[in-house]
Image (cartoon, rainbow, N blue to C red):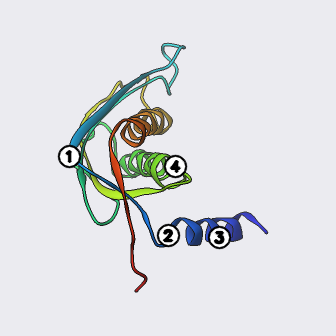
C-alpha cells in the first residue's frame, strides 16, 4: 500500500458511522513558544470558539497580518486544518461533532510560521478533546 492508498483507507476508517459530539460550547486557546528565540517556528497564538455541531467544521474568523500574502495565509490555514484533523479525527474515538471558529491569533514577524500555528492549534485541539465532555453520536450512512 502506498501513501495515497493509506490516506484513502484512513479516510474510510475515520468517516465510519459514529463519533463524539461536544456537549457544550467552550473556548480553547494555546500560545506556543519554542525554545530557540528567533527561529521561524517558535511563536504562535490561536484562540478558538468551539460549539456542538453535527459535523466538524473550521472557520477562520481572525485576520492574518496584512504582511502575509494570500498564498502564505493559505499555508497557515492548511497547517491549522491539518492540526485539527490530527488532534480530533485521527484518534480512536473521533471527535467530529463540533464547529470551530478561530477568533484570535497573535503573530510574530520573525518567529511565526505554518509549523508554529500547527503546533499551537494541535495543543488547543488536544485540550478540547481531553478536557471537555463529549457524547457518543451514531451517524447514519447516506
- Contact flag, marks 1 and 2 (Cβ < 8 Å): no
Q: How many marks?
A: 4
Which residue is denoted by mark 3 in the rendering? 9
Label 2 environment density (alpha carbons within 10 Å; few <14, some 14–19, many ≥20): some
* Quadrant position of the C terminus in the picture: bottom left
- Distance, label 2 to label 4, CA atoms, is 14 Å
Which residue is denoted by mark 1 in the rendering? 25
Label 3 environment density (alpha carbons within 10 Å; few <14, some 14–19, many ≥20): few
Q: Secondary structure at mark 1?
A: loop
- Distance, label 1 to label 4, CA atoms, is 21 Å
Q: Secondary structure at mark 2?
A: loop
Q: Looking at the image, is mark 2 or mark 3 earlier in the sequence?
A: 3
- Contact flag, marks 4 and 3 (Cβ < 8 Å): no
Image x and y of residue 41, in percent: 50, 27
Viewer can see residue 65: no
Which residue is denoted by mark 2 in the rendering? 15
Which residue is denoted by mark 4 in the rendering? 86
Q: Looking at the image, is mark 1 or mark 3 earlier in the sequence?
A: 3
Amino acid at each position: 500500500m502506498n501513501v495515497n492508498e493509506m490516506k484513502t483507507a484512513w479516510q474510510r476508517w475515520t468517516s465510519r458511522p459514529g463519533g463524539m459530539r461536544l456537549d457544550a460550547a467552550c473556548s480553547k486557546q494555546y500560545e506556543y513558544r519554542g525554545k530557540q528565540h528567533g527561529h521561524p517556528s517558535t511563536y504562535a497564538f490561536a484562540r478558538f470558539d468551539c460549539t456542538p455541531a453535527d459535523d466538524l467544521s473550521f472557520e477562520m474568523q481572525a485576520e492574518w497580518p496584512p504582511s502575509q500574502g494570500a498564498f502564505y495565509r493559505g499555508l497557515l490555514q492548511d497547517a491549522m486544518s491539518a492540526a485539527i484533523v490530527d488532534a480530533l479525527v485521527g484518534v480512536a474515538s473521533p471527535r467530529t461533532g463540533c464547529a470551530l471558529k478561530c477568533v484570535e491569533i497573535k503573530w510574530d514577524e520573525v518567529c511565526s510560521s505554518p509549523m508554529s500555528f500547527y503546533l499551537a492549534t494541535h495543543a488547543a485541539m488536544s485540550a478540547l478533546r481531553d478536557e471537555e465532555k463529549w457524547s457518543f453520536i451514531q451517524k447514519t450512512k447516506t
